[in-house]
Amino acid sequence: VHGRPSYRHKDGDTWWTNSNTEKKDVRAKQLAGDAALLQPLMWSVPQLGWFVGSAEHLGERRGSIFARAPQAATPNAVSSVWTTALGTSNGSMPLPNLRCVGDTEGLAAMAAMLGAKRAVLANGAGTVYFTPRRSDNPKFDRLRSSWVGVYRRLKDPNNGNNHADEYWIVNDRYVYERVATSTSASGPSSKTSRALWFAGDSWFIGYREHVGQPRGIFHARDLALQPEKINTQWLIAGSAASKQPAGSAGSTQLSVSSLDWVDAPDLAVISGDEGKQALTRYKAQLALRASKLGRRMGLNHAGKRKGAHPSDRLRGSQVSER
């Protein structure tokens, strides 16, 4: 391109962006089968320097990462500081620790980085709790109650073929599955079991069949390596919240590109005794609300019996109250 080589991301991953507008465009291209246009590439533009961005912008004077180095014939010859516009409202942000190096040095650096990242992952909690911290807010109870619970690291379904770790790692993060509350002998299927995973720039909670995809019922935009380290607010899919279905995977599994999300500030992924106590407290709150609702329904039923005498309705309400 422009007389110099261009480079493609080895794993062919989809390019990610922080722009909501571009995220919707990304999702549209994925649905249209144009995912190849979203793969990360690196190219040079004369008189400017080197760009990193999606394949659809190959050769253009635009990208998400840039280094002003017009004289560098290859990206590993760049000596200036790389910059990025990602995560900034305007202008660019320097990336002083980012370098482009050749094969031998690059492989060694990536191996060291991967080893350090795996060590951080291994030190995380194997069991976490997705639950409200302290809130007694009943909003979205019907939907939320079927997703809160105990989540544990999921064994690698590929029997460790991808890596030495016995647990499943997707997008450089462990995958967690909700501990089933059903007593069914067959257990939950991938279409009904709940899971927690990382994709793009966010953590998701959704159905296991969508592990690794940027879609789910809940999501939190956070790059934390461990889910219990998430510091940003969780969001709940707006359409799911309005319908509050008990149902199956499908229409309520919103992609991260959607703007239809509702704040869920009381939800968190918590580890250890704190998480266990928070989940126990929430389950007690649910039971109390269900009990109160049952008593109210009993009162309404007693009061609406067809043809009942007022004294009968009173006696009925007294019985229900007991």
Image (spheres, rainbow, N blue to C red):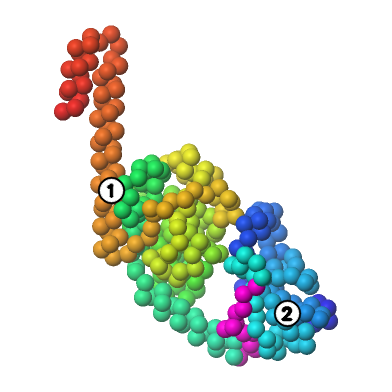
Residue type, mark 1 in image: Lys
In the figure, is residue 116 to the left or right of 128?
Answer: right
- Which mark lies nearer to you, 1 or 2? 2
Residue type, mark 2 in image: Trp
Q: Position of residue 218 (x, y in %)?
A: 47, 53
Q: Is residue 99 magenta?
A: yes
Question: In terms of secondary structure, where does tag 1 sit?
Answer: helix
Quarter in which the C terminus is drawn: top left
Q: Which mark is residue 50?
A: 2
In the figure, is residue 197 to the left or right of 185?
Answer: right
In the rendered image of this protein, does residue 32 appear above or below residue 96?
above
Give the class, few, some or many, for how many residues have Cα within 10 Å of label 2's Cα (few <14, many ≥20): many
State the separation of the CA atoms marked 1 and 2.
Answer: 55 Å
Most frequent secondary structure within the magenta stretch:
loop
Q: Position of residue 280 (x, y in %)?
A: 26, 53
Relative to the observer, which residue lies in front, 184 or 169? 169
- x 29%, y 22%: residue: 300
Question: Which range of residues does the magenta coloring cover?
Answer: 92-104
In the figure, is residue 14 to the left or right of 272?
Answer: right
Question: In terms of secondary structure, where does tag 2 sit?
Answer: strand
The residue tagged 1 is 283
Quarter in which the N terminus is drawn: bottom right
- x 45%, y 82%: residue: 116
Q: Residue furthest right?
A: 3
In the rendered image of this protein, does residue 158 appear above or below residue 100?
above
